[in-house]
Amino acid sequence: MDKIEVTGGHCLKGEVAISGAKNAALPILASALLTDGPCVMDNVPDLMDVRTTMDLLGHLGAKVSRDKTTVTVDASGVNEPEAPYELVRKMRASVLVLGPLTARLGRARVSLPGGCAIGARPIDLHLKGLEAMGAKVLLDKGYVNVIAQRLVGAEIYLDIPTVTGTENLMMAAALAKGTTVLRNAAREPEITALADTLNAMGAQVSGAGTPVIEIIGREKLHAANATIIPDRIEAATFMAAAAITNGDVLVRGAKSAHMGAVIEKMVEAGVVVDEVPEGLRVRGPATLQSVDVKTAPFPGFATDMQAQFMVMMCLASGRSTITETIFENRFIHVSELTRLGADISIVRNSAVIKGVASLKAAPVMASDLRASACLVLAGLVAQGSTLINRVYHIDRGYESIEKKLSGLGAQIRRIR
Ligand code: EPZ
């Protein structure tokens, strides 16, 4: 198991290029299942989760290939409706084939994704939406079976603005008979990116980015090309790295429109964020101000940035409260940060952070994708060398993070 060793005390300076967004690439790759020709996707990040998705699409009968950052998926030969446990357990986002497979083949059999470190993460809203469109859903032996001769458009209200739930149902509705309206839909930039791709395939999706999305079903969709948007969470993670190291970094490709409340909260904490043609220039202050944050669906403060922002607050001057409203167990990084000398106490779904003068290196354990990123950030400012175990979590969502941070002057290395 690889480890990452980070030695603190270096201000980050220079520029870093942001890769394509993991959470846009996964649904867009799955959407190729709706078409019968080669779809060419550009700017696809080379991440564990992307590789798993490519393996899954191959298992389903698609021809998949990668040439640098371009991935081609030809789903004309797709005939297998089953996504097996050994692939789904590696990546919950495999559930994103459920909608397209049901729409394309009239049936799908996907292993129920297990829970994960941050919560139970049920898919009941995905299934409720498919049933509203006329599908039969049966759960057996850990698999969910969905059967529908032809999905029929429906009015669907989502109790929670689920991101992959919205994506699954958009893809299913694209080939349904009639019109589907999704209410209380997720508004993340990745939803809009998927809608743009579906429309390029000949679908009729409108309202993406707002809480009401209308999809007029078509008989068939044709192959299309797509360019994956930059990863707003990777970008915000590097912004936080500049913020805590009193650095000055150009985050190339970062788009303020994709950041939701993250920029406002960083500016409140004393970070200088300038919009420049290439992206965002971020300068960290000598001392960060304490700021209260509550995670929320886009355009609120992204839950995927909660752990990274917490590191900033560990060294801020005063007390801050971070409330996690999306996942029920997304404070696993708190005990690891405490090992580094942070002063954090948890009260129900809020963490109260008292700023300390410094953090001290210690061996720590990554537990989920964004918690691992937060431990790398903490290592950048902790006195001494921090050893992070189980970094396979980080490889799922960050493309060569140690190379990108070294390029900014960090002292960081991967120990195989
Ligand atoms: C997506 O997960 C992202 N993953 C997550 O990013 C992100 O944290 C999350 O959205 C929230 O923004 C991908 O896009 C691949 P949800 P998703 O469905 O779609 C509950 C990362 O770090 N819920 O919006 O699984 C659920 O339990 C990952 O890249 C139901 O109850 O999240 C959670 O509490 C981590 N029933 C809340 O809704 C359902 O049917 C939001 O979940 C679906 C969700």
Image (tube, rainbow, N blue to C red):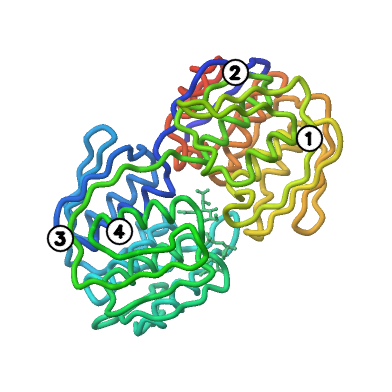
Name the residue that disc number 2 marks. Answer: 12
Which structural element holds mark 1?
loop
Q: Relative to 403, is 280 on the left or the right?
A: right
Amino acid found under the numbered disc labelled 1: Ala
Are there few (<14), some (14-19), or many (20+) residues within 10 Å of tag 1? many
Question: Whole-Å distance between the Cαs marked 1 and 3?
Answer: 53 Å
Question: Whole-Å distance between the Cαs marked 4 and 3?
Answer: 13 Å
Image position of 250 with respect to 30: above or below = above
Quadrant of the drawing holding the C terminus: top left
Quarter residue 140 falls in: bottom left
Indicate which disc, 4 or 2, sits on the residue closer to the N terminus: 2
Indicate which disc, 1 or 3, sits on the residue closer to the N terminus: 3
Image position of 352 with respect to 140: above or below = above
Are there few (<14), some (14-19), or many (20+) residues within 10 Å of tag 4? many
Return the mark for residue 36: 3
Name the residue that disc number 4 marks. Answer: 198
Indicate which disc, 4 or 3, sits on the residue closer to the N terminus: 3
Labels 4, 3: front one? 4
Amino acid found under the numbered disc labelled 4: Leu
Q: Are marks 4 and 3 in contact (CB under 8 Å)?
A: no
